[in-house]
Amino acid sequence: MDFHYKDGQLYAEDVKVKEIVKEVGTPVYIYSKAHFVEQFNKFDKAFKREHTISFAVKANSNLAVINVFAKLGAGADIVSKGELFRALKAGVDAKKIVFSGVAKRDDEIEYAIENDIMMINVESEDELEAVNRVAQKLSKKARISLRVNPDVDPKTHPYISTGLKKNKFGVPHNEAFDLYLKAKELPNIEIYGIQFHIGSQLLDTKPIYDASLKIAELMRALSDKGIEFKVVDVGGGVGIVYNEEEDKEPSIDDYAKQVEEAFKDFNIKLVFEPGRFLVGNGGILVSEVIYHKTNGDKKFLIVDAGMNDLLRPSLYNAYHKIAPVEKQNREEIVCDIVGPICETGDFFGRDYKIEDVPNGEYIAVFSAGAYGFTMASNYNSRPRPAEVLVDGDSFRVVRERETLEDLIKGETI
Ligand SMILES: *Cc1c(COP(=O)(O)O)cnc(C)c1O
């Protein structure tokens, strides 16, 4: 299944990666549909209670990928008008779409209300007023939840921790109570849910349980004031294994048990917003080795993909497994695997031990299915890579490689 070696050759499901590269070129993102389906089912089956899985589109927003999940019954967690546009285009049921983000503009709120999405996850008092105002203009009632910041430490990278007091996300736990009371009085607001999302790449789901208990307590207090909820949105954040030697995959069954136990007293539907868990290990980035180079004692493997294609190592110092597309028992070298971008931070691996790959051959950067292409840019005027979706023994390009003309689209002298 998904990515594996057979006789030294890397396969994506039943397709040789080298065959895809020969046809599509490099750099290229390759996704495994089977992996996406498997991860979705693993998540889905763990829960006994009624629930909706709203795929966090920011992790991988290719239409074909969103569509795989939409067909399995998933909704979408979106953070912009653009992502809502994509989710609808990809066939997601609007009733399963939740809208997160701290800086929603009026036009984005309007677009969400007009499309009648499940709910807007409101992150501040100003935003609550904006939603009420926009809904009033449209003569509608907007379904909302408040994103509550429960102030629990998710024990993850500081850049992807979101549920601490010092983070910009959500409404502080102690202020959420009053804000719900205010929301109740606003004529064009319908209180629909309560939401939290404490961070990403959580390998231990206990902090989500701790947050759930805090949210449940808040819900009890609000219930005494006559405020009840239709849904509890537990956010996303469940982590994946990047480094087989260090990371331990969280147990989805334990996670499900913890969450269901925390909200057992409430007659609500659960909503989840997983991103990375569904797609992270379902994608690789394949790149050609262009040159070998030695500066003093330091060896470099220079490849044709860069931080503009996959930003995570540069942005978070994130670890990605890297291996040859064809293993041929060549000697191992210790090197920095770097790209063409004019930045010292442009690397995929540092002091990385890898079987040497000759110039003109290919490497695969694993676990690139989440926050890979979606963070890609045109920095250094490099066209963004193609994306390919593999399904069994066939594959298709689901996003063409950008052209030079694409680079200057809309520009004038
Ligand atoms: C990024 C994000 C997610 C998805 O996080 P993952 O770690 O990829 O599961 C879900 N909800 C919100 C509000 C987010 O910002």
Image (tube, helix red, strand yellow):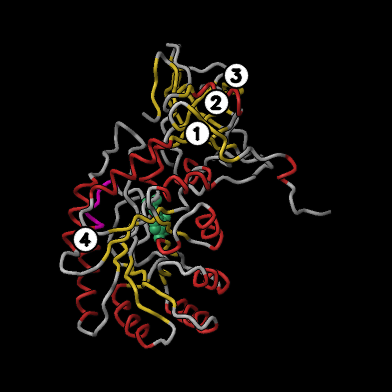
Of the numbered discs 1 and 4, the one sitting upstream in the chain is 1
Provide the residue span drawn in magenta: 203-208
Circle 2 is placed at which residue position?
A: 20
* Circles 3 and 4: CB atoms closer than 8 Å: no
Select label 2 or label 3 by which is in front. 2
Of the numbered discs 3 and 4, the one sitting upstream in the chain is 4
* Circles 2 and 1: CB atoms closer than 8 Å: yes
Q: Is residue 97 left or right of residue 266?
A: right
- How far, Cα to Cα, is label 2 from label 1? 9 Å
Where's residue 336, x and y in %? 50, 28
Q: Secondary structure at mark 3?
A: loop
Q: Secondary structure at mark 2?
A: helix
Where's residue 130, x and y in %? 50, 79
- How far, Cα to Cα, is label 1 from label 4? 37 Å
Q: Amino acid at mark 2?
A: Ile
Q: Which quadrant does ligand 1 occupy?
A: bottom left
Circle 1 is placed at which residue position?
A: 30
Q: Which mark is residue 210?
A: 4
* Circles 2 and 4: CB atoms closer than 8 Å: no
The quadrant in which the C terminus is found is: bottom right
- Relative to the observer, which residue lies in front, 14 or 128? 14
- Relative to the observer, which residue lies in front, 152 or 72? 72
Ligand 1 neighbours mark 2 (CB distance < 8 Å): no
Q: Is residue 112 magenta?
A: no
Residue 158 can be seen, yes or no: no
Of the numbered discs 2 and 3, the one sitting upstream in the chain is 2
Ligand 1 neighbours mark 3 (CB distance < 8 Å): no
Q: Residue at x 63, y 38 (%)?
A: 342
Select label 1 or label 4 by which is in front. 1
Q: Which mark is residue 360?
A: 3
Q: Amino acid at mark 1?
A: Ile
Where's residue 87, x and y in %? 50, 55
